[in-house]
Image (cartoon, rainbow, N blue to C red):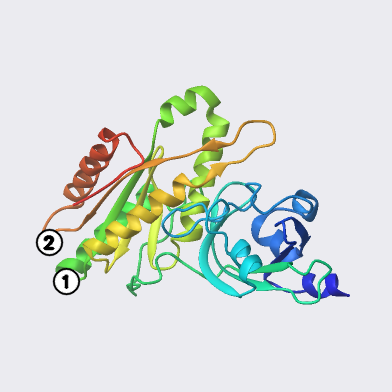
Amino acid sequence: MFEQLMDSLYEGIYIVDGNRKITFWNKGAERITGFKPEDVIGKYCHDNILNHVDAQGRLLCLNGCPLHMTIKDRLPRESHLFVQHKKGYRIPVTIKTVPLEGAEDPLSVAEIFTENYNVGDNIPVMACPEPELIKDQITGLPNREYLEQLLRHHISLNRTLNLQFGVILTDIDTFEEFNNIYGRRLSDDVMRMLAKTLTETFSHAEVVGRWRQDEFLFIFSGASKEQLKNLAEGIRMLSESSALRGATFKDVDVTISVGATRYHAGETMENLIARAYELLKASKRKGGNFVTVK
């Protein structure tokens, strides 16, 4: 009866004992993360399963685990974090850790998580007509043609209504070398995994699309320079904490270089993108996995 009740809930729920060994995993947890009960029950929550990270990129399963703290002091907690899907991409969630009284193990704790937190929620959405969406075939994201139309649309709005916007351009570090080692199929899988992370975590107040090869372009309306910098750091951190997970090959980690800038009144789309590329190159020169903002 307990399992039927837990499986009927939309939220993800799992239970650990006092040693953080997973003893229960409901259908909601399977739906959100892709992990089946047989994948996780009997393992420990710090066994690189969900790889919880916070907005600063700290790996909480190794240091600062909310479940572990609730086991120790028996106090409930709520946090906005990111978990890792079985396929490697990141998912923003709100989690609650709750001590269970009367369980077989008196130190048992449940974690309840929902997909209702978004990195860009503090940036206002600009309500305005936009070009017809054209998707990239590999990632399913908006393609370059669509992004160019949208950039011209934003520039027009800036000139007529003084509506501000900014862009963030990213590039996967050492992607050519990776492509030579792993081949085209896995390279495309990495692109899709990273695209999924980016759309899951930056989907409400902005647009992200595939610009060229392994480059992604974000367009943010109404973002200040400081907000743009924070968003760029979030994009870099979430990319770094994602990985392409596979049964037949070693997990493939990904880092990106980032250039971020706001639109300057009167300039062309080409001027804006050229400046973003220069900032991106500056991040590459610093060794990659870096953000440069101007």
Amino acid marked by disc 1: Asn
Q: Nearer the viewer, residue 286 or 47?
A: 47
Say above or below: 273 vs 264. Answer: above
Question: Would residue 121 appear left or right of 110 to someone viewing this image?
Answer: left
Give the residue furthest to the left: 266
Q: Position of residue 15 (x, y in %)?
A: 73, 64
- Quadrant of the snapshot with the N terminus: bottom right
Q: Residue at x 31, y 62 (%)?
A: 220
Give the residue furthest to the right: 1
Give the residue furthest to the front: 73
Question: Would residue 194 appear left or right of 15 to someone viewing this image?
Answer: left
Query: In which quadrant of the rendered view does residue 245 lie?
Result: top right
Q: Earlier in the sequence, mark 2 or mark 1?
A: 1
Amino acid marked by disc 2: Ala
Residue underneath mark 1: 162
Helix, strand or loop at label 1? It is loop
Q: CA distance from mark 2 to mark 1?
A: 8 Å
Q: Nearer the viewer, residue 185 or 86?
A: 86
Say above or below: 219 vs 144. Answer: below
Query: CB under 8 Å between callouts 2 and 1?
Result: yes
Helix, strand or loop at label 2? It is loop
Q: Nearer the viewer, residue 108 or 197?
A: 108
Q: Position of residue 63 (x, y in %)?
A: 53, 54
Residue underneath mark 2: 265
Say above or below: 182 vs 21. Answer: above
